[in-house]
Amino acid sequence: MEPPRPPAGRGRRPEPRRRPARTRRESAERPLNARTVRGTWLLVALPLLLAAFTVSRPDVLPAPTLPPGFDGGTTATLARELARDYPDRSPGTAGALGAAQWFQRQLGLYGFRAQQDQFEAEIPGRGRVRLANLVAVAEGASPRAIVFLAHRDNAGFGPGEADNASGTAVLIELARAYAPVTGGSGIQARPAHRLVFVSTDGGAYGALGAAHFAESSPYADDAIAVISLDALGGGGLPRLLIGGDTPRSPASTLVRTAAVRVLEATGAEPQRASALRQLLDLGFPYTLGEQGPLVTRGIPALTLTTASGSRAELEQAPLDAARLADLGRATQALLGSLDSGLELGQGPASYVYLGRRIVLGWAIQLVLVAALLPFAIGAVDLFARLRRRRISLLPAVRSLRSRAFFWAFVGALLFAAARLGAFPAAPDGRPLPPDAPGVGQPPLLVVALLVALGGAAWLVSRERLLPRRPATTEESLAGYAVALLALGLVAVLVVATNPFALVYLLPTLYAWLWLPQVHAGPALLRGALLAAGLAGPLLLVLSFAERQQLGWETPWYLLSLVATGYVPWLAVLLALGWLAAGAQLATLAGSRYAAFPDIRDRTEQPLRGLAGRLLRTARGHRAPREERDALEG
């Protein structure tokens, strides 16, 4: 017989509240070993510490002993004369031919004979056009060359006093100081190095003349430094451009010496890209400056400019004579520093320029590669746990393969469209200027055709990926593991090609790594992680939009760079692999994933199945209408 229970509130102990059962770590609900992933981040501390110790101060070449004798008034007069007499100097026009003859006449007054170096290039909207670089040489004691170049053409938006009649005029004034004296003595100021003055053509269309000079001129092979003079008479602040078409930078001594000479002449340091922008440029190398093709070929080169805003605005802007005189003196002082007999001591390398300090590129690469370790350990550990539980990964691999085939087809469509002329013709592998004809505005017919063909391929490829039943937990985890391993393979190939590009990939890796951990959690959390993984590509698009002042045309412009060959096709293949893995993770996060069916479960071919499903859908829409007509009758 049970003893009587005490009344409520009198000596009765309350029953203990039961806690909700927590999912066990490394279970099917929480398959990721989060503690190991977090602990592995300690390994990144050592490369970060090493990178901090590699921060160094670049050397500066001494200033010339003689004060610069730059004539700013004469230079401004020459710039205005060129812009007035030949306002349209775009390649292939009569103005371009007249401007070339004008430049030869001006140097001829000082005893120089400018040699023509003709070549052909593809100009957007004009086809194949003949262009010409003009080269004048002042021989020195050393055969090693110091090269100054400036493009004399424009795009025809305006007379181009600032862009780039000002740079051409400075080039002439620099050459005048080393011209042969026409008197009886015939004395000539003899520099320590050979000085080469190059008036390039096609600079407004992707630095075509500079690229031709870098590829074919013997002076480029012997150059210890190349200085590009671009829009020195503009109204903007002085700025240094150091980026190339590959993840390389010019010798840090050259960059710092140029910055100090500008500081001495103008009273302010020249502007430069921020550290983040330089890192992004190393991850996705792109430049329209004439230093780009030279740095790519291992030649120390930089561009001194005041350009800001669109090319149309710059070509229509008036000449700032005071700015032109200041930068002309800085350029002449830089020439004296380079000709002092001291060598730069370092060729093009990768680094981030902070002004008085630089961070070496190899240290940054080491940090980025070390940041891959936590992801790699987490993904491999997830794969190993699934294998120990004997969860088959083959259906997930086949699902990823099907998505990869679709994105490969999209890449083939893009390649075929480029070959058939859907995109503006590429100027011999150079980047297309955003304001070139037809670059920023996609033709609607081409876009519609690409979307239609891509949509048809998507309908066919998804036929075997439709979820005909809810995926089991094991199938979903297998899908996550295979997609994450594919992302890891993409990351390894990125390291082998350009480790700086990891700056765009790391947000994806660490946002999507946690998707298996929350696969049973709220859909909103899964969607947030999926969206966070798009931060890297979004950063690339936004940086291009801000830099080139593009809007919604930015994706089309990036596609133009891909289709015309400026972006390497290996990088395109890696991007397609990223898209395939991302598509699989998106279906998993959205609970729309289906493992690839086994051969015994396939009832029909994809095309036949798609046609049958469309036919059944059409009949389903027609049947209610017939029933309604019968009832009304």
Image (spheres, rainbow, N blue to C red):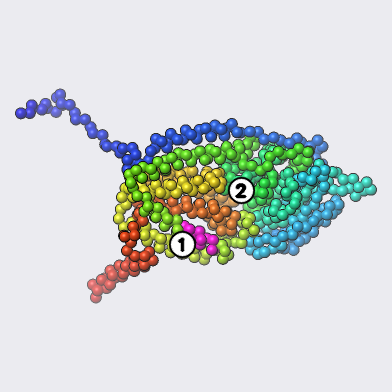
77 and 140: which is toward the camera: 140
**Disc 1 on helix, strand or loop?**
helix
Query: Furthest-left residue in view?
Result: 1
Across and down, in percent, residue 546 comes to 57, 48
Residue 309: which disc?
A: none
Question: Is 613 on the left or on the right of 318, as rendered?
Answer: left
Identify which residue is drawn at 48% across, 58% down. Answer: 408
Identify which residue is drawn at 32% across, 67% down. Answer: 616
How many discs mark residues in the rendered view? 2
**Disc 2 on helix, strand or loop?**
loop
Query: Furthest-top residue in view?
Result: 11
Across and down, in percent, residue 59 comes to 69, 35
Q: Which amino acid, by three-letter code, is at mark 2?
A: Thr
Identify which residue is drawn at 50% across, 59% down. Answer: 411
Answer few, some or many: residues within 10 Å of disc 1's Cα (few below 14, many 20 plus, some between 14 and 19): some
410 and 559: which is toward the camera: 410
Which residue range is magenta in the image? 407-417
> Which residue is under mark 2?
246
Q: Which of marks 2 and 1 precedes in the sequence?
A: 2
From the viewer's perspective, is residue 142 above or below residue 471? above
Q: Quarter holding the N terminus?
A: top left
Q: Report if residue 307 is visible in the image.
A: no
Question: Is 395 on the left or on the right of 117, as rendered?
Answer: left
Q: Is residue 416 magenta?
A: yes
Q: Which amino acid, by three-letter code, is at mark 1?
A: Gly
Q: Quarter holding the C terminus?
A: bottom left
Q: Is residue 15 magenta?
A: no
Across and down, in percent, residue 42 comes to 47, 33
335 and 489: which is toward the camera: 489
Q: Main secondary structure of the magenta part?
A: helix
Identify which residue is drawn at 69% across, 53% down. Answer: 215
Residue 454: which disc?
A: 1
